[in-house]
Image (spheres, rainbow, N blue to C red):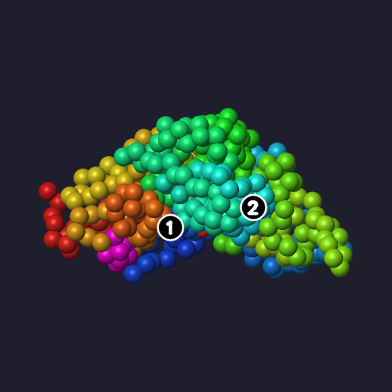
Amino acid sequence: MTHQTQSQHTFDSERVRADFPILGRTARGKRLAYLDSAASTQKPQQVIDAINSFYSESNANVHRGVYELSERSTELYDQARGTIARLINAPDKRQCIFVRNTTEAINLVANSWGRENLKAGDTIVLTMLEHHSNIVPWQVIAQQVGAKIEYVDIDDAGRLRMDQLRELLASGSVKVVATTQVSNTLGTITPLKEITSLAHDAGAIVVADAAQSVPHMQVDVQDLDVDFLAFSGHKMVGPMGIGVLYGKRDLLEAMPPYQTGGSMIREVHLDHTTWADLPEKFEAGTPSVADAVGIAVAADYLSEIGFASIREHEITLTNYALGQLREIPGMTLFGPDGEDRAGVVSFVIDGAHPHDIASILDGEGVAVRAGHHCAQPLMRRLDVTATARASFYIYNTEEDVDQLVSAVETVNSIFGRRAS
Ligand SMILES: Cc1ncc(COP(=O)(O)O)c(C=O)c1O
């Protein structure tokens, strides 16, 4: 079905909403305003049907069968990889490895590429914006090989201090820069292409955490020239349990396997084993075929709406939300104001703990996240213990924002502050 309206860059979010059965339900007896898509998105009927139809009509293990069902399943798995490669403009679908999620993708790179290429005295550069899944795997490998970790700080608006990145790269010891493309907490969109070009000039590779970018904007791995890029199906209207690691071919080919066992071998002897080619080398064991089919349908669903339209919709909603939230007494909003901000709004209110805010909002049918957002170093940098976070996606409407704003006003009245 088509969701486009007359203008090329807009779509009908009410029609999109109708594709998502869960959004028709109530929460605490109120209309559900689902504003936690940065944690996980809801799924359209098209994705639910695709998974259902895989198990009803095509289920069998891949690769190993010569019978019709196994061939069908293998073909669907392979087609799904092709769809994902097109989504991010990967030159070859074999450079797209199916993993469980962004976390597993980054662990794969840190353990396989890292163990092979990092040594004592090398520097790993991360940023203050990172999710724990782009910090902890690097800390573990750094400890194992004796490498050092340095962080690029943010400025007061939540943008990366590019001057610091340049300084760190000038040391000559940086082997890898691992950075998010969009902060899940501040919504900051980092200048990934520029970061990559600077890192390459300094002889470092770039690992991009695209968990919050691939679902929301056109990501072109060839244009960005990143070496690795990781994202998760469940944040892009696809299923949980599947994610993707894209990698440059020469790097992937030179890397040892991350996990070993079935499906990733060429030959197994009693005393040694040789590895399969890409992508199988990195896909040990039975893959989640239904979820691969699901993520491909999700990719097609988003592509059909169009990433320019998705981005424009999210900018409109974010600005609409910021404009109203800014007027609320006691409100502190985090993140940059401008083109380089995604549809994420983190805030705190004087005198109200973010968990209390979220639970009062929940009583009004508004689902937001409260806590450290798996970014504890960033929380410390912002000098807060937690924030409340609303995040917007294709199925959100101005009505959701109005419901959020009115629920936040309720927070203020409960905590004894009235709008001035
Ligand atoms: C920026 C970012 N990176 C990584 C992750 C981890 O994703 P997953 O839990 O799917 O591995 C998240 C999830 O919130 C995220 O927002």
Is 113 inside the magenta-drawn segment?
A: no
Q: Secondary structure at mark 2?
A: helix
Q: 66 or 164, which lies in front?
A: 164
The x, y position of residue 311, in whole percent, is: 46, 40
- Left or right position of 409 against 296: left
Q: Residue at x 58, y 48 (%)?
A: 120
- Left or right position of 348 against 116: left
- Number of the label disc, if any, that sits on residue 374: 1
Mark 1 beta carbon near ligand 1 (under 8 Å): yes
The x, y position of residue 252, in whole percent, is: 71, 46
Please tell me whether residue 9 is drawn above or below residue 260 in the rendered image.
above
User: Which residue type does callout 1 highlight?
Assistant: Cys
Q: 13 or 354, which lies in front?
A: 354
Closer to the N terminus: mark 2 or mark 1? 2
Q: What separation in Å lies between label 2 and label 1 (alpha carbons)?
A: 25 Å
Crowding near the residue tagged with mark 1, few <14, some 14–19, many ≥20 C-alpha atoms within 10 Å:
some
Is 360 inside the magenta-drawn segment?
A: yes
First to last magenta residue range = 354-363
The x, y position of residue 370, in whole percent, is: 35, 60
Image quadrant in which you'd find residue 416: bottom left
Residue at numbered disc 2: 115
- Left or right position of 111 against 136: right
The x, y position of residue 375, in whole percent, is: 41, 54
User: Which residue type does callout 2 highlight?
Assistant: Arg
Q: Secondary structure at mark 1?
A: loop
- Which SS type dominates the magenta stretch? helix
- Left or right position of 158 against 244: left
